[in-house]
């Protein structure tokens, strides 16, 4: 059994950001990570052409800006280097290969009891902490919908987190299910590698350029959300025209209101829309059923495919190991409280990276959590001195 003031679960951007903030305050912590590296989502589960969708000024972690020479919209490898430099700079030493299996609050001791499996040694270790920080993020496990007949499909089936590039799909008929940023960009990548690409678009989405989003985020510093949404939506309409005839419909809510209230991001177009407009990438409605290589769609269209890539998002697995998740989370793994009060729960448990506000939200959470832990510790010390 090992005791610590703060136990952080997850060494992604949120986990290392909290570690840095605590280190700045000389507050001791232990950081557990089940993978063999930090930021494993970026290093292991991101496709080759992946870039940050926001300008780098909105994507830095606390106390360390991006280098001036770095591209405004950072490539995956550039961001990974930034993360590795961040870990080195703040002397963050995650305990890799530690998979947390259970975390519960001991009402008698007033502390968190955490069981973690040391994967290398194949032993279970117990940690006791005054504060618990959940930093496992939104993207724990790839979600694939339960489509009738999916198990009968004879071709390749993968989640977008397994996709690297379209190289092996040249001349193949590939269906991408999901029209978020990953689905749209993977579709474009597949086309560029010579695949016959189709994409399922069911939900309304805002399609914008990354420059529009950047301008919008700057405008939000000075103007109300409603005005900014109106301006950016008009810019999108001017740029792309009416996309409904191509199967792409705009939501009723503006792009920034939609992000703030539901967490759904606008699609940052990388060239996919032009290929859809030219008919080089086909848009299809929802999938009804699958029979071997034949797929039936909602409009009764039937077509054969060699591969299906599901860009259908992720599901949190936090509630599987956080036994007392009700102190801070709903059963879907997201905070019970709305922004900006989402990060703090009962009995000294916190969550970071679940505000659905990207890396900017991660930084805000990390600073708020470290500040709160410092306030609680000072209160305890003052009470003991008294």
Image: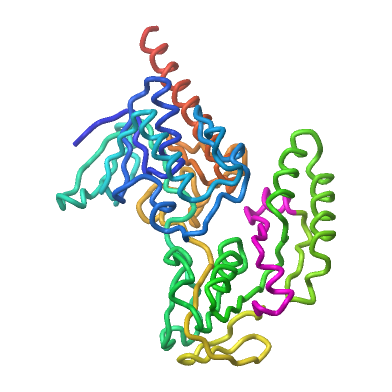
- Magenta stretch: give its range: 255-282
Residue shown at 45% from the left, 39% from the top? 82
Residue shown at 51% from the left, 86% from the top? 305
Total of numbered circles in the picture?
0
Where residue 342 sits, quadrant-wise, is: top right
Work out whether 339 lies above or below 6.
below
| Residue 281, percent from left and from top | 64, 77
Along the line of sight, the residue nearer the viewer: 307 or 352: 307
Residue shown at 54% from the left, 39% from the top? 70
Asked whether 364 falls inside the magenta stretch, the response is: no
Q: Quadrant of the N terminus?
A: top left
Left or right? Give the position of 362 relative to 96: right
Q: Quadrant of the C terminus?
A: top left
Asked whether 257 falls inside the magenta stretch, the response is: yes
Work out whether 208 lies above or below 218.
below
| Residue 43, percent from left and from top | 40, 52
Left or right? Give the position of 87 relative to 191: left
């Amino acid at each position: 059994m090992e005791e610590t003031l703060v136990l952080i679960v997850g060494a992604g951007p949120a986990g290392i950001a909290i570690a840095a903030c605590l280190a700045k305050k000389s507050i001791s912590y232990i950081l557990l990570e089940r993978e063999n590296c930090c930021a494993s989502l970026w290093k292991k589960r991101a496709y080759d052409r992946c870039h940050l969708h926001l300008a780098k000024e909105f994507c830095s972690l606390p106390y360390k800006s991006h280098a001036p020479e770095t591209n405004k919209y950072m490539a995956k490898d550039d961001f990974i280097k930034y993360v590795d430099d961040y870990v080195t700079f703040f002397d963050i030493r995650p305990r890799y290969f530690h998979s947390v299996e259970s975390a519960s609050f001991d009402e008698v001791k007033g502390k968190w009891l955490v069981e973690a499996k040391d994967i290398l040694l194949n032993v279970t270790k117990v940690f006791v902490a005054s504060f618990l920080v959940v930093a496992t993020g939104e993207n724990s496990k790839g979600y694939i919908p339960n489509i009738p007949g999916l198990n009968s499909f004879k071709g390749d089936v993968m989640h977008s987190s397994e996709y690297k590039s379209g190289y092996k799909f040249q001349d193949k008929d590939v269906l991408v299910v999901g029209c978020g940023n990953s689905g749209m960009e993977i579709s474009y990548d597949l086309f560029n590698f010579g695949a016959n690409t189709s994409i399922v678009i069911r939900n309304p989405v805002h399609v914008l350029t990354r420059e529009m989003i950047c301008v919008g985020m700057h405008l939000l510093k000075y103007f109300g959300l409603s005005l900014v949404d109106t301006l950016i939506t008009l810019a999108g309409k001017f740029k792309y025209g009416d996309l409904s005839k191509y199967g792409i419909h705009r939501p009723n809510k503006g792009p920034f209101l939609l992000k703030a209230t539901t967490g759904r991001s606008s699609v940052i177009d990388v060239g996919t829309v032009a290929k859809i407009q030219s008919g080089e990438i086909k848009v299809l409605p929802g999938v009804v059923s699958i029979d071997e290589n034949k797929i039936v769609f909602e409009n009764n269209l039937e077509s054969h495919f060699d591969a299906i890539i599901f860009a259908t998002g992720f599901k949190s697995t936090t509630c599987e190991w956080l036994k007392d998740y009700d102190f801070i989370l709903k059963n879907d793994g997201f905070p019970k409280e709305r922004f900006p009060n989402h990060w703090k729960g009962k009995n000294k448990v916190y969550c970071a990276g679940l505000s659905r506000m990207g890396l900017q939200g991660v930084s805000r959470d990390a600073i708020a959590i470290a500040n709160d832990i410092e306030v609680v510790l000072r209160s305890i010390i003052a009470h003991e001195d008294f």
